[in-house]
Each structure stands twice: as structure tokens, then as C-alpha cells.
Amino acid sequence: MVSYLQYWLRMVRCALSGGRAYYTWMATLLVFIALGGWFWAHDLTHGLGGTNMSDHVSWGIGIANFVYFVGVAAGAAVLVVPAYAFHREDIKEIVLLGELLAVVAVTMCLLFITTDLGRPERMWHLFPIIGFLNVPSSLLGWDVLVFMGYLAMNLHIPGYLLWSRYKGKKPTPLAYLPFVFLSMFWAVSIHTVTAFLLSGLGSRPFWNTPILAPRFLISAGASAPALLIFLFTAIKKYGGLPVKDSVFDYFSKVLRVTMPINLFLLGCEVFQEFYTGALHSASAHYLYFGLHGKGMLSVFIWTAILFNITATAIFLVPKLRTQRWLMFVGCGLAVVGIWIEKGMGLIFPGFIPSPLGEVVEYAPNVGEIIVCLGVVALGAFVYTAMAKITIAIQRGTLRQHPEPEAQAPEAPAPAAPATEPTEA
Amino acid sequence: MSQRPVTCQKTDCTAPSCAPDCAPSAPASGLVQLRRDGGTSRRSLLQAAAGTVAAAVAAPACNTPEFEAYFQKHYKKLTDEDKVKVFARLEERTRQKTGVRVRIGDPPPIEGVHFAYALNLSHCNGNRRCAEACARENNLPDEPEMRYIRVLELDNGSQHLERGTVYYDRDKVPAPGKFYLPVQCHQCDNAPCVKACPTGATWKENDGIVVVDYDWCIGCRYCQAACPYHARRFNWVEPKIEPSRINPHQAYLSNRIRQVGVVEKCTFCLQRTRRGMYPACYEVCPTGARKFGDLSDPESEVRQIVENKRVWILKEDIGTEPRFFYFYG
């Protein structure tokens, strides 16, 4: 017990110590967290009337970000599967950082939901026994369940492995491997349930399509590796963890599969909406070409398509992808493109036109964007701290019984996800 | 034309008889304060933020009304004694906030009664008195305006909802070449909103009315996304009603004053209909287009209409099985 407390103290100390660059990075994030908190406090006291949402478009940027980061959380499977199912040693060395990314992404998802609630202080109503969780009927209820499960698993696995390594003991496979394999399937479930949450609504023909869950999974498989390329480049540079080139090759391979499929699925959707020509495709018309003189979102969806096609071309053509800087450009385009697809391309147009045919447009205002940035900053803050500790433990600088010549406090910690996809 | 004579344009419940005995409290400053308050110092901002969070999370001290309100159970778990206490607390809150003494009741569903609505589109002329009477009866705020009933003006020969509008001039109705389609909560038997709610804060009662426990709703608005009739409203800000316009005859599951951050909807005026009265929208309608009654009573007007007229329901393809029928008669 005492040694466990000491373990935590040492981890906190590790997270608190760093170079100037580390402190600057963390302080910047803190500023954004404080700003987001301040704007959310305003929502708490005055209601969500300060946002641009309405009874017509009742979900906005918060839910859009939620859907996107579910993809990031599920994307951890991109690391977990090859590490444990195919025993790739190079990926096994970094898999803990992927699992921690899932922890952070799930936490961010929960925060995006919380900050979007009209009555966040009543969250306890969702807890079984003291409250009431409406399962199996409510997909949002299911989301709560699968998220809690995924969070618990991804806290347990790296938590246990790091503790073992810190103690210098060999981990017992039975204590974590079953959860590792369960989490591979669970990763699919969180994104599937989130897709069902939308596709199960007969009232919203735009979402009411069976292709939504596969689309979510594939786009998660595209945006997660793109993000991970940035993440591990930063970790390699600032965190001092030797990430092998084969890892980056692997991400690039995944992208070469998922990006074209993502485009293909989008094409399937577009065909069905426009060729059928039924009234139900009103939202698609609004999204791509505008409806009744209103078409605020068109520019975004076409941008997203352009970005995704360009990124796919970069990934597929060997001459292009072997250029390092072009690969980064491709990853950036893919991350932004898929983020737009989820928000402006999926959540907002689902509400436009309203079920009674009214075209009421929506764009987030400064307050909503800052709250979202605050959540992203909080995620980056927590991830940076956790990654710093993880690297220290993995490299053996943080041990229960340190070797006589412990390394000096190392260089600044890894940068967080390089993209802040909220400003659009 | 079997037009019903306009006997009563004002619902008998709406008279705010006890409103004036306390002066209305001054409403708090502007409805939604702008976020960019320029001159405030950083420290005061942070203090305010800390205070807000504390107030929202920790402030309810034990045994205060706030504490009891925070830990109030789901409506279905409240005992009769609990209800007495809860209703008294809510009445007191309204008195403190608005100066109006209201009475909150809890009329149960009447055994064997299944309410249904029928609307004669041949008669409706789009005057929208229903929406206004509804607002008065059900304590809907005027600023920002919230209405349960939306009336669409559509072109003759089409039910293409997108080509219609709700923003027509109601002093110039009926406009030539147009017809009017009022839409409110359809109290669906297979209600998507009830299925969607993660906390079970909305459910279907035995008489067919879909209700919301405003004290249990967490404000996630999934029900709004799920409703194919755009029937649900969210309180984006604290609802404000002129104290003189508050209807003091209230029910817990329907027209009591709502709070910020929760969803609400039409309840077929259950505070009236469960006591043998007609809904406010029915009573006020000058054209006689609205018909309301007990579907399980073979003699009732709605039952006769559903059996003998060629009725139809909105968006039948979605399978919501509404208790709200339209017909041309």
C-alpha cells in the first residue's frame, strides 16, 4: 500500500518536472483549459442559450467532436491488434501510449457530452441503482455503458503493466491479456453504438442508413493512424522514446487501405441520396448544394472531399508518400477532412431541414468553440503528463528501486495531438 | 360545414386569479448576457467561475430545499408523502421567483381512457389561436417565444413540408391556394423519444399521454433528435413569463413552470383533460377543426371520426403510431 502511494507520488513528481519547453506547453494548455472552463461556467449559470444551437439544430459542435473523438478512442485498436494479435514487437513497445490515448479520447468524449447537457449536475440520474439507465432501449444509455467499459479496460491494462514494470516484476498474462483481447472488440463496439445512436432514428433520414457504422469504423481507421503519425513523431522528437521507422510504415499501410475505403463509402452514400431523388435526401441536398437559398455547409463538405481525395492520392502514390513532408501534409488533410465529415458533414445536416421542413442553419459561436478547445486542451494536458510518466517507466528511469545511475530528468515531454480540430 | 359556435375563446383555467397579491419580482438582468464582458478583471472572472462551479456542484447544504431538489427521486419512485413535499417546494419556488401562488396537482390517468386527437384540415384556417391558448394554459414563455403547436401553411395539392412555412401572417388567413397543417406532439404509441431517453425521464402514461419529469431530465436533447414531428422544446434559457400571465392551476407532469436546461412538450393539457375538461387548443379553436376525446369510448367524437372518416397520420412510414389523426371532413 505504502509503495503504491509512493508510486503515485513519484509519477506526479515526474509529471511536474520538466524543461522550459515542457512547462510552456503545459501552461499554454492550462490557459485554454481555464478559458474553456470559464465559458462552460457561463453555460452552467445561464443555460445553453448562449450557444447557437436551437430547437431545430439541437446538437452542435460538442456532439460533432464527441463523434470524432470516439473514432480516435476506437483507433487505439490500430495499435492493440498488431501488438497483441500479431506480436509485432516494434508496436508492442509503444502500445501503452496508444491505450492511454484511448483513455484520454474517451474522457474527452464524456466531457463533450457533459458540457453539452442542459443539466450536467444531474448526471447521477444515469447511474444504475441510484438513478435509472434506460437500457436496452436507449442507445445513449448503451453509449454510457460501452464507454465506461472501454475506459475501465484501457485504464486497467496500461495501469497494470506500468505498475509491474515499475516494480520490476514480470506481469501475469492472465491479469491483462483477456482484457486486451476484449478491448479489441470493445473498440469496435464504442463506435458502432455511437453510429447506431444516430442511424437508429427514423426521424432523421440523413442518418437513418445502415452504412453509418461501417463508415464510422473506417473513418476512425483513417483518422487515428494519421493522428498517431503526428503523435509518435512528436514523442520521438521530444519524448526521447525511440519509435522505429517500421511503426510509421505500418501506419502508412493502414492509411492506404482505410482512406480509399472511406471515400468509397462516402460515394455509396452520395449515390443513394442523389440517384433515388426521394424527399428523404433533402439533408444531402442541403449539405452539398444548399436548400431554399441556404447552404452554409456546402463549402465545408466540398473542402472535406477535396482534402480526403488529396490525402488519399498522397498515400497511394509511392513517389509522393516517400517524401516526408508530403506524408505529413497528407495526414493533416486526412485528420481535418474526416473531422469536417463528422461535424459539418454529418451531425449538423442531420437536423437540416427540421422534420417539419424548416431550414434553420447552425454554426458554432466563439463560446462553443472555446469550450471545445478547452476539452481538447484538457485531453492534451492529461495525455502529455501520462505519456511522460509512461516513457519514464518504460525506459527505466522511474523505478521502485532505481539503478544506481538514474538518468537525469529528461527532455521536454511529447507534444499532444498536433491538430486542434475545433477551429474551423 | 358543421362549425362549432365560438362560445369560449378563453380557457376557463387561465384566469390568473391569485397573481396580483404579491408584487412580481424584478426579472434578473438581460436574458442571455453576452459572453464577451470586456472590462472585468481576470481575478474576478476566475472567482466568478469558481463560485459558479461551487454553486452548481457543492452548494446545496443539507436539508435545504436545494439539497432536497438535487436528490429528488424519479417521479415514479416518489411516494404520496414525497409528492406532497415536492409539490409544496415547487409551489414555494414559483412564489419566491414570480410572486404568484400556484397550485401543483397530480391528476392520475383515468382508468380505461385512451386520449386521441383528430384534426379536420378542411376547417382549419391557420389562425393559430390554438398555439396562443396553449401557451397561456401551459405557461410557455413569450421571450424567447416557445410554442408547442406549429401551424404550417402549405400549397394546395402538396404535402411537401419543406415548401410550406410557419412564418405566415396570421391576420391574412386563409390565404388563397393554401391549406394549414397544425402539428403538435402526436403522443405516439411507439414513441421514438421515449425509446431514446437515457434516463427514463419521459414515458407514456396509461391514457396514452407522453409526459416528461422535468426534475429528472438531464437535458441531453436526444429526444429532440428522435422526434419526427419537431414536437419537443428545450429550455435554452430560464423560461420567463409575465407573472400576470401565469396559469396557477398546474400539474407536476404538465404545465408547471419549467426550469432551464430541460425538455418539454404538449401533454394534451393533462391538467385539464384528466379532470374532464377539453384541451386549451380544442376550446379556443374558432373553426371547430379540433376534435378530442376517448378513443376507447365507442360513442366519442374522435372514435366516430377514426372509424368513419378517411383519417390519415403524419409520417406513417416511420411507424410511430400516433394518437393524432388528420382528416378532411
Image (spheres, coloured by chain):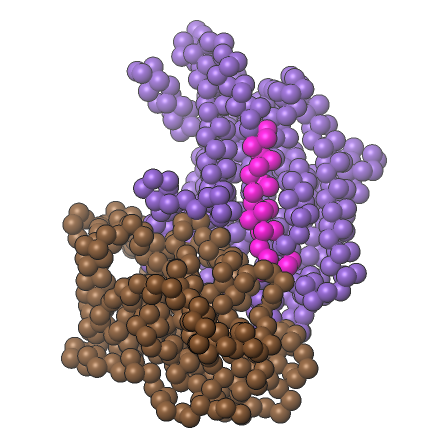
Q: Is residue A44 above or below residue A352?
A: above
Spot occupied by residue B98 in the image (x, y as percentages of width and height): 23, 72
Q: Is residue A350 above or below residue B98?
A: above
Query: In this view of the protein, which residue sits in the foreground, A157 or A175?
Result: A175
Residue at 73% across / 27% down in the picture?
A: A249
Q: Is residue A8 visible?
A: yes
Q: Residue furthest top?
A: A404
Main SS type for the magenta part?
helix
Query: In this view of the protein, which residue sits in the foreground, A172 or A382?
Result: A172
Q: Is residue A310 left or right of residue A403?
A: right
Query: In this view of the protein, which residue sits in the foreground, B178 or B295?
Result: B295
Q: Is residue A116 above or below residue B211?
A: above
Residue at 22% across / 61% down in the picture?
A: B87
| Chain letter corresponding to the colour brown | B
Residue at 56% across / 45% down in the picture?
A: A194
Quarter of image, res A352: bottom right
Q: Quadrant where the C terminus of chain B lies?
A: bottom right
Query: In this view of the protein, which residue sits in the foreground, A190 or A306?
Result: A190
Q: Is residue B154 left or right of residue A375?
A: right
Q: Is residue B71 left or right of residue A354?
A: left
Spot occupied by residue A301 in the image (x, y as percentages of width and height): 69, 57
Q: Is residue B154 above or below residue A76?
A: below
Spot occupied by residue B299 in the image (x, y as percentages of width and height): 44, 76
Residue at 48% across / 43% down in the picture?
A: A136
Q: Is residue A174 magenta?
A: no
Tell me what hue chain A is rendered in. Answer: purple
Spot occupied by residue A314 in the image (x, y as percentages of width and height): 78, 41
Q: Is residue A189 magenta?
A: yes
User: Which residues lie in the magenta part?
Assistant: A184-206
